Image: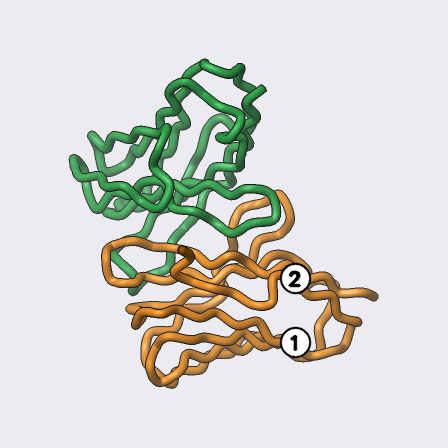
Chain colours: A orange, B green
């Protein structure tokens, strides 16, 4: 079973539209991370959330972690073609493991 | 700093062959990880290490072995390669457990034919 579930699995949006990606765990998370992967390349760190209710923003990307530390959302405002890629949430679920979600493939149409 | 370096970048193996994927980091990180990423999928944890001499299984360890004799190196060994092991393999490291970001290598694309 997957410890971290992401939704949606894929997303196609028109340039300029807002979008949200969700990451859900059945366990309390010790840290939640968002990474972006361009097709065929390595992972790029976006941001880390540790405290319940925490919210961070970088440029047009905002990530939130719920109070229970079991769910996070990544919101992109006014999407651009440069936002295209695979978004992955990663987390420490308390057993020294750094596991990842299933990924969300984002395509932005110009 | 070079960060996390993986070699080789690409490899084609025949069924039944063995190989070692190399991973080295120069950040003095205690934690190191091996993941595989199948096409269109997320990352699955194969093995991880919390320090030299200490390794443990992740989500999908069958068919793989690891060792951690030094802080810097964390090689992944494939014995008797099978087509199901065709994937992109990523090595990562972090300073500590889940309160710091992980740094990733560029990946090794492995095809077993």
- When the figure is inspected, residue A84 is found, relative to residue A52, above or below; the finding is above
Q: Is residue A59 visible?
A: no
Residue A19 is marked as: 1
From this viewpoint, which residue is outermost toward the right? Answer: A110
From the top left corner, tell me how far across and down residue B84 is, in percent.
51, 30
| Mark before the other along the chain sequence, 2 or 1 | 2
- When the figure is inspected, residue A66 is found, relative to residue B89, above or below; the finding is below
- When the figure is inspected, residue B8 is found, relative to residue A62, above or below; the finding is above
Closest to the observer, A107 or B31: A107
The answer to whether tags 2 and 1 share a subunit is yes
Q: Chain of mark 1?
A: A
From the top left corner, tell me how far across and down residue B3 is, in percent.
40, 44
Q: Secondary structure at mark 1?
A: strand
From the top left corner, tell me how far across and down residue A75 is, in percent.
58, 77
- When the figure is inspected, residue B35 is found, relative to residue B109, above or below; the finding is below
Side of A22 where B55 appears, left or right: left
Side of A91 where A22 appears, left or right: right
Residue A10 is marked as: 2
Residue B23's image quarter?
top left
Q: Nearer the viewer, mark 2 or mark 1?
A: 2
Q: Is residue A53 visible?
A: yes
Residue B69 is marked as: none
Residue B48's image quarter?
top left
Q: Residue at x 35, y 33 (%)?
A: B62
Q: Residue at x 64, y 57 (%)?
A: A85
From the top left corner, tell me how far across and down residue B103 is, in percent.
41, 50
Say few, some or many: other residues with alpha carbon within 10 Å of mark 2 (under 14 / 14 to 19 / 20 or more).
some
Pointer 2 with pointer 1, Cβ within 8 A: no
Side of B55 where B93 appears, left or right: right
Q: Secondary structure at mark 2?
A: strand
Residue A7's image quarter?
bottom right
């Amino acid at each position: 079973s997957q410890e971290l579930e992401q939704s949606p699995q894929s997303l196609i949006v028109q340039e300029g539209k807002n979008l949200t990606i969700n990451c859900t765990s059945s366990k309390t998370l010790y840290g939640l991370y968002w990474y972006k992967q361009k097709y065929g390349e390595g992972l790029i760190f976006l941001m880390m959330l540790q405290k319940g209710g925490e919210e961070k923003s970088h440029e047009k990307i905002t990530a939130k972690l719920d109070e229970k530390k079991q769910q996070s959302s990544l919101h992109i405002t006014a999407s651009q073609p440069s936002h295209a890629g695979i978004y992955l949430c990663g987390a420490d679920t308390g057993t020294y493991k750094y596991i990842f979600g299933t990924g969300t493939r984002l395509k932005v149409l110009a | 700093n070079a960060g996390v370096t993986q070699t080789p970048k690409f490899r084609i193996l025949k069924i039944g062959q063995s190989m070692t994927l190399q991973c080295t980091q120069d950040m003095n990180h205690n934690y190191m990880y091996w993941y595989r990423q199948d096409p269109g999928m997320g990352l699955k944890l194969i093995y991880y290490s919390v320090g030299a001499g200490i390794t443990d299984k992740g989500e999908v360890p069958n068919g793989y072995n690891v060792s951690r004799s030094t802080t810097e190196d964390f090689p992944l060994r494939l014995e008797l390669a099978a087509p199901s092991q065709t994937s992109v393999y990523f090595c990562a490291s972090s300073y500590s457990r889940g309160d710091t970001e992980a740094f990733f290598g560029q990946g090794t694309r492995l095809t077993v034919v």
